[in-house]
Image: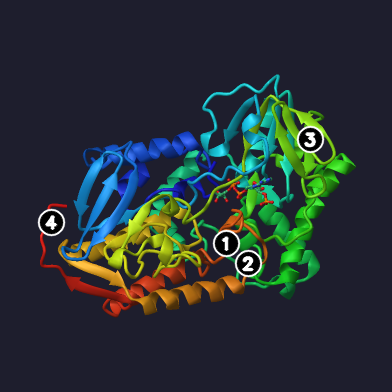
Amino acid sequence: MSDSHSHIFRYSFDKEDLTAYQGWPERYVKQPQVLAYLQHIVERHDLRRDLQLETALLGAHFDEENNVWEVETSRGNFTVRYLITALGLLSKSNVPEIPGLDTFKGEMYHSSQFPDHYNFSTKRVGVIGGGSTGVQIITAVSKNVGRLISFQRHPQYSVPAGDEPISKEERDKINRDWDKIWDHVWNSITAMGVNESTTPAMSVSAEERHRIFQEAWDKGNGFRFMFETFSDITTSEEANEAAAAFIREKIAEIIKDTEKRRLLTPHDLYARRPLCDAGYYQAFNQENVDIVHLGETPIVEVTPNGIRTSAEEYELDALILATGFDAVDGNFNRTKIHGRHGTSLKEHWQYGPSSYLGVFVPGFPNMFMLTGPNGPFTNTPPIIETQGDLVTKLIAEGEGQAVIEATTQAESQWTQICREIANKTLFWKLDTWIFGANIPGKPRTVLFYLGGMQNYRAKIAEMVEEGYTGLKITKSIAQTGG
Ligand code: NA7
């Protein structure tokens, strides 16, 4: 399930389709609905003739003489003027290196390979990981499972998602308000459709704070709880602790068993990606759902029959790895992309990935990244659309012949801006995928522009207005069939 609201987890550009398309009956879209929407977009805009599926990018190198990219794929080579990467923010699975993992005899799935059909009704299921995905899987699987054991290193703060059907009246209103809705998305921090607060948490009384937290809790959505309540939950430790304490109170009310409650109560900052759920803490009130806190009793090994921690051995029939992704640059590291002078992207990014605006990398002319490193940390479809629009405009204005490349100075200034903003947030204090800190051996670095969608778009608008500052644009004389 996406936790961006269904009506803005899509493209804004086709108003007629926004109004007519019926495939989102609830507040949040589920995976089959996302897939169906993308297929619908492909059909509606006749994109299939331009798609070649089942084709892996193996490598690409920039031919400086002809100003083209020579691209090697699993199904042949191509010469192209422009190389646009859309390799996904969260698509390279993180399968942890746990001793004995490959000896497990039962069913085993990473969350990204979760089966369409499953029946765990009589099975003993272990879930490793408790991020957005783990929380959703635990909640869903607990409804019909023999026994479920959640193995967690860090218990998390989660608030209700508030998923529910969209009534006809609400849908009609959304259809009347599309302009306003998108205007709000483009001019917000999170692009999530929440009304971001401008009030610091400590500027109101304790009673008022409680009322505001309760209201957000009742409406549902993690981003709403973090951003619509107060303006400084992600920047002030005092405000953050107030939000965390409110959620801890809720956990104490919900979870009956004192030991499970203790193990599931977080005490660190509320500064991971905000989560929401459909009855996650409630699931642990079932006798057949249990929690193992790996901070107290770490996994020693996976055995053919289950998991052995420092305290106990748990027999399992199925193991689900909700262990996340090698985010942002993970998929780039699987390809061999070489720019000017044969320099590889890997070499260019040896101290951590960098870019200008999340799209351009100096030394890699005419390579444009959608959702590349140091792009905004927001609802994702609006990022894709914003960056897609910019790239399309650049290509069109150069009549498909221009050579477009970021300057080194623009890249270092943008990297500096991203670092300075990240440093001011509490997110920076925890080791999560937002900073590449979930992958052993990966440099911990800033991977996102945390300045919000509105500021990001303002930076792009300013760059365009000033005649594409930070980009070197020359006209190519060489012709290519690509
Ligand atoms: P996340 O948010 O990275 O969560 C992964 C979880 O897996 C998290 O609880 C990790 O614990 C845990 N993990 C990772 N490696 C291990 C090992 N080796 N042992 C035990 N536990 C481990 O990934 P999600 O898929 O939930 O969400 C990713 C994003 O996708 C999500 O935010 C949405 O934006 C879409 P940790 O907290 O690191 O201790």
- The residue lying toward the viewer, choosing from 169 and 2, is 2
Amino acid marked by disc 2: Trp
Q: Is residue 46 above or below residue 237?
A: above
How many C-alpha atoms fall within 10 Å of the one at disc 4: few (<14), some, or many (≥20)?
few
How many C-alpha atoms fall within 10 Å of the one at disc 3: few (<14), some, or many (≥20)?
some
Residue occupying image coordinates x 32% and y 41%: 41
> In the image, 181: left or right of 468?
right
Q: CA distance from mark 4 to mark 2?
A: 45 Å
Amino acid marked by disc 4: Thr
- The mark nearer the N terminus, 1 or 4, is 1
Amino acid marked by disc 1: Phe
Query: Which residue, given by chain and number where applicable, does mark 3 sit on?
Result: 290
Query: Which residue, given by chain and number where applicable, does mark 4 sit on?
Result: 480
> In the image, 339: left or right of 251?
left
Residue occupying image coordinates x 69% and y 27%: 304
Secondary element under disc 3, as helix, strand or loop, is strand
How many C-alpha atoms fall within 10 Å of the one at disc 2: few (<14), some, or many (≥20)?
many
Q: CA distance from mark 2 to mark 1?
A: 7 Å
Query: Which residue, given by chain and number where applicable, does mark 1 sit on?
Result: 435
Question: In terms of image quadrants, where is residue 282?
Answer: top right
Secondary element under disc 4, as helix, strand or loop, is loop
Of the numbered discs in the image, which one, if any, rests on residue 94? Answer: none
Q: CA distance from mark 1 to mark 4?
A: 39 Å
Secondary element under disc 2, as helix, strand or loop, is helix
Q: Are marks 2 and 1 in contact (CB under 8 Å)?
A: yes
- The mark nearer the N terminus, 3 or 1, is 3
Residue occupying image coordinates x 58% and y 32%: 109
Q: CA distance from mark 4 to mark 3?
A: 61 Å
- The residue lying toward the viewer, choosing from 119 and 324, is 324
